[in-house]
Amino acid sequence: MPRLAYKKSMSLGEAISSVCFFGVGVVWLSQGMDMIDVEAYWRAAGLFICGLVCLAACFRYVIQNTLFKLFVGFDEDEKPNQ
């Protein structure tokens, strides 16, 4: 299992990449809706999957911190890394 670490702050580059992931996810979900209108269902399904993965990548640090709290515990994030 990969090592989980609690991330307290985010750099500017990480914030920019999160915004980009969000934008691409919204665009792909929108394109997926257009593909449903033209009855290209396989292409729409692929765009929906990619859009949802991009939206999950937008929230990757929130997911990481939540998994850390679930698996490691709530009191471990106050201890300094050794």
Image (cartoon, rainbow, N blue to C red):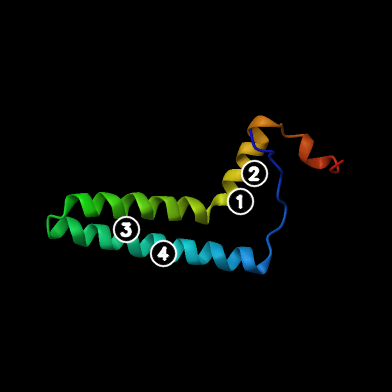
Of badges 4 and 2, nearer the viewer stands 4
Distance from the alpha carbon under mark 4 to that under mark 3: 9 Å
The residue beneath circle 4 is 24
Residue 61 is marked as 1
Q: Write the residue at 51% across / 56% down.
A: 58
Toward the viewer: 48 or 79? Answer: 48
The residue beneath circle 2 is 65
Report if the CB atoms under discs 2 and 1 are less than 8 Å apart: yes
Residue 70: x, y in percent?
A: 63, 32
> Please, what secondary structure does the residue beneath circle 3 have?
helix
The residue beneath circle 3 is 29
Residue 51: x, y in percent?
A: 37, 55
| Pointer 2 local density, CA inside 10 Å: few below 14, some 14–19, many at least 20 | some
Q: Which quadrant of the rendered structure holds the N terminus?
A: top right
Question: Viewed as shown, does residue 39 lie left or right of 52?
Answer: left
Name which of mark 1 and mark 4 comes first in the sequence: 4
Distance from the alpha carbon under mark 4 to that under mark 2: 23 Å
Three-letter residue code for mark 1:
Tyr
